[in-house]
Image: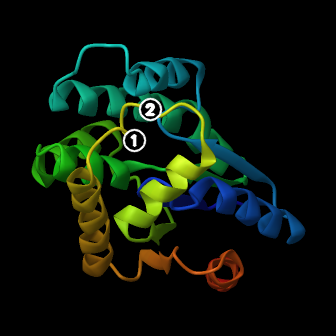
Amino acid sequence: MIGKFIALEGGEGAGKSTNAQFIKQQLEARGLEVLLTREPGGTPLGEKVRAILLDTTLPAMTPTTEALLMFAARAEHYAQVIAPALAAGQWVISDRFVDASFAYQGAARGLGSNKIAELADWTLPNVQADLTLVFDLPVEVGMMRVQARGGVIDRFEQEPPAFFEQVRQAYLERAVKAPSHYCVLDASQDLSAVQRVIAEQLDRLCLG
């Protein structure tokens, strides 16, 4: 039996990491084998690329370089981790996938959706998550959460609010164009309310 693939998307501070653990627990309670992974990262090569992408001490890179690094890590991630897990019948949960590049590099960095689509078609032909959960909340709320959790602020988290507003709108636009593929969650709600909707989506996916 082929497994199913769930991608978690959204801006900074939207709660993807917290809810990734919740989804894993929910699926395992159904007797499913689950792999939890992330982007950029997920492989030894990908984690090294992640460190470069988030490093605030490096000189600024061009949007094209950023996009190519993202897709290099992603191609390796899919080939070495995601595809084998799915083929083995595991359910895969990835904290970010291709939609992140449409939002961050395509919209906020200004490369445009066509260039990102070309990269996606070249590196991951006919690959799409079975369900993409978009954790949506106002930019100012997300940034307050990032500041409240403390720790090191990475290169993306240092961007201005206008950058993240472009990211947010790009996610919402993609969800509107393919409502059967995306579920937009109001991540500004109480966690219990968000997780009730997630559980409903998982029920639908398990029965589908």
The residue tagged 1 is 157
Disc 2 and disc 1 in contact, CB within 8 angstroms: yes
- Which image quadrant: the N terminus? bottom right
State the image quarter where residue 141 is shown: bottom left
Q: To which quarter of the image does residue 134 belong?
A: bottom left
Is residue 174 at all visible to an observer of this figure? yes
Q: Is residue 71 left or right of residue 22?
A: left
Residue at 28% over, 57% down: 167
Q: Secondary structure at mark 2?
A: loop
Residue 2 in sight:
no
Q: Is 42 left or right of 119, judged from the image as shown? A: right
Residue 194 percent coordinates (x, y): 62, 79
Q: Quadrant of the C terminus?
A: bottom right
Look at the picture and state if 180 lies above or below 151: below
Residue position for label 2: 154
36 lies above or below 153: below
